């Protein structure tokens, strides 16, 4: 099938590459000319395992194309995906200007019937706004005769495993009342629906809410465990033992109940906020979600409080090695990353940071640039040189089994602040290092 995708970010580009790999012909449209130029040269501007190879392979095979020309994009295919960003507006609600701009563009250039598929994460009711925007533009063109349908098809990929998630999705949600649209999307997704039925068809509003409900449920699990970790620290319990204890109940399960220093990234924070705003708008108090947000904001400072406690409130002039900058492993994305909150708090207190991340060094440089109190180090060992203490902010695999002997020799204060509980307290103690974790410091 022929498909056009507006937006070549984490979602649009991965979706395009995976659809092309399955044999579809995909044209990607973006407003960022530099990005499109790089993509045409086979260069992928984001880090996502397997993506660059897929983009090169399918571009070479003549199934994946890139353009900045919206007219070309609209003319290319009957199915038009909207996968542009929906960042938080000033009040926390989802900013729909990019989504509606694409809707306007499609209506501006369409000459035949279209299926418009909203893949961006958008509040309930957005498909109606997309429809209204398109009707408005078609009326202005005196082309009210042109027909279109607006469907919802939210994306559930995870950064860091986006290609794998898109290639083998857990579920494919299709929100539409139109049989024709359902048939077209079933055909599009047939290559991904072979093992067992993954397509779930529902009405548009339910599809839109499904995406928010999924992210908010996951954010709630994290914040709940972080709250338990706070209690464990104060009550003399070990949260890791508690985690095993509750995970063994199949009604709870082991997935996604790791305590830590809070969730970040481009999705959970903004989606929790946006659903709270949606609830506000209809006069409903989303009390659970507000609590999730409050807990998460506090959790990002959890290690900072432990660091200040250890150093009796004075860290001016001290140097901290920081392992991990990305908001989670296998990505270079630092949006809303706990590492940023930690670094900024350390700088405000007069400390210096020697940082290393396997993938996010360029991104860190882009965000903070040259600073006297930030040294971006070539590798994780170099970050330890001349540092007082180590902070672990992201659970990259390469951080899990370090040489503790060398670490002890390098750190002047012999202390680790482990924001992801990747180290075993007994092992670390054997090497004469003091370990602070999340929810197990009393043991
Ligand atoms: N990143 C994730 O893990 C993830 C997962 C699931 C859903 N989502 C949702 O998917 C949507 C996209 O997220 P993302 O992370 O890919 O965003 P992103 O910011 O990485 O990419 C968005 C892209 O859209 C382009 N764009 C903006 N306006 C445009 C226009 N008028 N025409 C064409 N291109 C335009 C931008 O230049 C950019 O390249 C968001 O709603 C997000 O919430 C993201």
Image (cartoon, grey):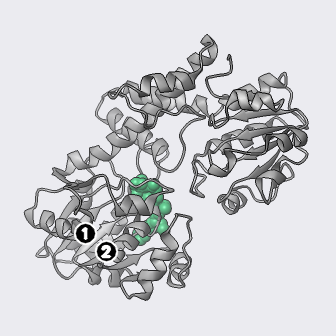
Identified at 49% across, 55% down, the residue is: 159
Cβ(mark 2) to ligand 1 < 8 Å?
no
302 or 54: nearer the eye?
54
Identified at 35% across, 77% down, the residue is: 20
Is 112 drawn above or below residue 244 in the view shown?
Answer: below
The C terminus - image quarter: top right
Identified at 38% across, 32% down, the residue is: 253
Identified at 36% across, 52% down, the residue is: 156
**Label 2 CA crowd tier, 10 Å (few <14, some 14–19, many 20+):** some
Is 84 drawn above or below residue 31 in the view shown?
Answer: above
Residue 336: percent from the left, percent from the top?
A: 58, 46
- Res. 390 image quadrant: top right
Residue closest to the far left: 179
Residue marked by disc 1: 191
Residue 105: percent from the left, percent from the top?
A: 32, 73
Residue 110: percent from the left, percent from the top?
A: 23, 79
Q: Quadrant of ligand 1?
A: bottom left
> Would residue 215 be seen by someone viewing this image from the given angle?
yes
The N terminus - image quarter: bottom left
405 or 63: nearer the eye?
405
> Would residue 85 be seen by someone viewing this image from the given angle?
no
Q: In terms of sequence position, does the residue under pointer 2 or pointer 1 come before the other? A: 2
Question: How many callouts does the rendering have?
Answer: 2
Residue marked by disc 2: 22
113 on left or right of 298: left
The local secondary structure at tag 1 comes to: helix
127 on left or right of 147: right
Q: Marks 2 and 1: CB-CB under 8 Å? A: yes
Measure how far apart labels 2 and 1 are at the Cα level. Answer: 6 Å
The local secondary structure at tag 2 comes to: loop
């Amino acid at each position: 099938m022929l498909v056009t995708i507006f937006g070549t970010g984490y979602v649009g580009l991965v979706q395009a590459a995976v659809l092309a790999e399955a044999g579809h012909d995909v044209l990607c449209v973006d407003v960022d000319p530099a990005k499109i130029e790089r993509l045409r040269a086979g260069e992928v501007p984001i880090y996502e395992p397997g993506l660059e190879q897929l983009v090169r392979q399918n571009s070479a095979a003549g199934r994946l194309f890139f353009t900045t020309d919206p007219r070309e994009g609209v003319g290319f295919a009957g199915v038009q995906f909207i996968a542009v960003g929906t960042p938080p507006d000033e009040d926390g609600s989802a900013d729909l200007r990019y989504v509606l701009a694409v809707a306007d563009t499609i209506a501006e250039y369409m000459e035949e019937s279209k299926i418009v598929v909203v893949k961006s994460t958008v509040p309930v009711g957005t498909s109606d706004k997309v429809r209204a925007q398109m009707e408005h533009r078609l009326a202005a063109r005196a082309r009210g005769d042109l027909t279109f349908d607006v469907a919802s098809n939210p994306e559930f990929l995870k950064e860091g495993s986006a290609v794998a998630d898109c290639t083998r999705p857990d579920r494919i949600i299709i929100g539409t009342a139109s049989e024709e649209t359902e048939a077209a999307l079933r055909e599009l997704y047939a290559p991904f629906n072979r093992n067992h039925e993954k397509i779930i068809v529902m009405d548009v509003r339910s599809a839109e809410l499904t995406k928010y409900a999924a992210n908010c449920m996951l954010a709630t699990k994290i914040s709940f465990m972080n709250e338990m970790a706070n209690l464990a620290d104060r009550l003399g319990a070990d949260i890791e033992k508690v985690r095993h204890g509750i995970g063994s109940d199949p009604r709870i399960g082991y997935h996604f109940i790791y305590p830590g220093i809070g969730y970040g990234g481009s999705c959970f924070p903004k989606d929790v906020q946006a659903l709270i705003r949606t609830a506000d708008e209809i006069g409903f108090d989303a009390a659970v979600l507000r609590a999730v947000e409050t807990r998460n904001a506090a959790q990002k400072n959890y290690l900072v409080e432990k660091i200040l406690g250890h150093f009796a409130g004075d860290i001016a002039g001290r140097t901290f090695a920081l392992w991990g900058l990305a908001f989670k492993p296998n990505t270079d994305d630092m949006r809303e990353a706990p590492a940023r909150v930690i670094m900024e708090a350390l700088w405000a207190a007069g400390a210096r940071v020697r940082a290393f991340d396997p993938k996010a060094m360029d991104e860190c440089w882009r965000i903070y640039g040259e600073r006297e109190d930030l040294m971006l180090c070539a590798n994780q060992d170099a970050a330890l040189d001349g540092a007082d203490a180590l902070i672990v902010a992201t659970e990259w695999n390469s951080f899990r089994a370090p040489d503790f002997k060398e670490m002890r020799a390098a750190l002047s204060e012999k202390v680790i602040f482990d924001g992801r509980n990747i180290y075993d307290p007994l092992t670390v103690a054997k090497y004469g290092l003091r370990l602070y974790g999340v929810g197990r410091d009393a043991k």
